[in-house]
Image (cartoon, rainbow, N blue to C red):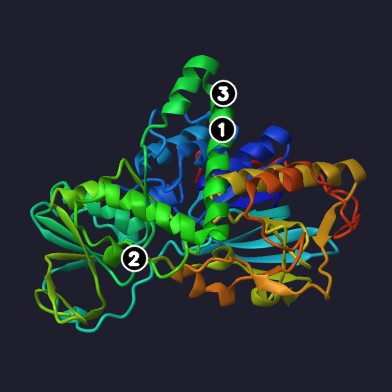
Amino acid sequence: MNEHLDVVIVGAGLSGIGAAHHLQSAFPDRAYLVLEARESIGGTWDLFRYPGVRSDSDMHTLGYRFRPWTDAKAIADGPAILDYVRATAADAGIDRRIRFGHKVVDAAWDSGAACWTLTVEHDGTTVTMTCSYLYVCGGYYRYDSGYTPEFAGIEDFRGRVVHPQHWPDDLDHAGSRVVVIGSGATAVTLVPALAQTAAHVTMLQRSPTYILSVPTVDVVATRLRELLGSRRAYAVTRWKNVLISTLIYQLSQRRPAMMRKFIREQTIKQLPEGYEVDVHFNPAYGPWDQRLCLVPDGDLFRAIGDGNAAIVTDRIERFTERGLLLASGAEVAADIVVTATGLQLHALGGIRLTVDGREVPLPQTMTYKGMMLGGVPNFAFTIGYTNASWTLKADLVAEYVCRLLRHMDAHGYDRCVPVPDPAIGTRPLLDFQAGYVLRSLDRFPKAGSRAPWRLGMNYAQDVLTLRHGRIEDGTLRFARATPRRAASEVMARPTGH
């Protein structure tokens, strides 16, 4: 017999561990497993090992709602975040419910049995299991490869070329001339970190990005902890930071000229007098049309001011033996080139979905509340905010899934499916202008033109909708397809393998 679970969670990263915590807190006796394709907990924070890797959001909002972040640093480094995720899993016993090296490749829904049959690759073999509810928390980008454009002459370069997503353990950049290609969050993190020991670091960008300095330590949060204790201070700080980030985002969308001027003025204060701010820090797009990059305590600006790093804004003509030839005719010498050129997106971790024998065409499918798929029963997925911390949305999705399961239990339902209205127009799922998003949107499901099919990007509004809104809203359809199946007595192996 195949193993049967009440819920299978796919992915043991930040979202998956949070989902498991919410699920087992709400349903202590429910049989569930977390299936993780890699061999460790942590997802993004275990995968990325490049120098200086850190959060690009404050930890009072990137942290879980149920587990206060108590470290002094609000902008945390990757190892600290990984420890936080792993400690969350260990303290709740979630690590004993994870099966590592298990990659879900196919999920087939059977309405007659009201369950999913999962095809899972493990250790060179294929195993199957069934579950009543499938919850995908694997993020939205490929872990096996990042995005690197085709560069002419790259084979001529005598130095080393690396992508941050797969940072080599043996790479020693001390005393080397390093060129970082890119201008996003990864590049602005790498440059000051590498500049500490490299001979010199050049950030080579095709176009500028909005960059804003923020304090590493949130002094308000520190003071609140002294006055209120960790848990209450965390809740207050979380809402404080949500409101500030929401204000910045809304002003960026509604008063772009004002915000552009504000960010420019802040940048000028951080850089040496006479620096060409309008060449290297003047994006062609509006504030928050792409993600705003945060640098803790202005470390990027400080590295530039100290002369350890520089920014060059130009286009790459080709690689040469000694470095990079630019469209302007200038050549940038390099011993190491880091291609911080972005991610490759991967919808639902590449899992093939079928419903009653028919494959689900993701690009023609509409998302319900940004977390379920129209016409796909007993299924949820997590995509976090693009304009705020990922975990704010992940927590709300997990809470909603638990509310939904509780509602189904109370009414004896074993099937729930969102049914789209054919009259609703479609929109891109991610209304975001970043290159890595635009390259892959055609492979993702669509959002709708109005609620509840629109992907919300406002935390306060989503709190009302997902945490307190009605479950039976006329769009979700419920059914009692079969007599309820008893939960399997088979639980996750204690070893985690």
**Disc 1 to disc 2: CB gap under 8 Å:** no
Say the numbered circle drawn on residue 93.
1
Work out whether residue 373 or residue 242 is closer to the camera in this orientation and state it: 242
Bin the neighbour count of mark 2 within 10 Å (Cα to Cα): few under 14, some 14-19, many 20 and up.
many
Pointer 2 or 3: first along the chain: 2
Foreground tag (3 vs 1): 3
**Residue found 42% across the figure and 40% down from its top:** 81
- Residue 139 visible from this viewpoint: no
Looking at the rendered structure, the kind of residue marked 2 is Pro
Q: Secondary structure at mark 1?
A: loop
| In this view, 98 is above or below 88 | below
Q: How many marks?
A: 3
**Residue found 30% across the figure and 64% down from its top:** 278
Q: Quadrant of the N terminus?
A: bottom right
Figure quadrant of residue 464: top right
Find disc 3 in the rendering and name its residue: 231
Looking at the rendered structure, the kind of residue marked 1 is Gly
Q: Secondary structure at mark 3?
A: helix
- Left or right placement of residue 155 versus residue 477 in this view: left
Q: CA distance from mark 3 to mark 1?
A: 21 Å
- Left or right placement of residue 473 versus residue 214 in this view: right
Q: CA distance from mark 1 to mark 2?
A: 45 Å
Find disc 2 in the rendering and name its residue: 208
Q: Position of residue 320 (x, y in %)?
A: 13, 79
**Residue found 55% across the figure and 35% down from its top:** 240
**Disc 3 to disc 1: CB gap under 8 Å:** no
Work out whether residue 66 or residue 219 is closer to the camera in this orientation and state it: 219
Looking at the rendered structure, the kind of residue marked 3 is Arg
Say the numbered circle drawn on residue 32.
none
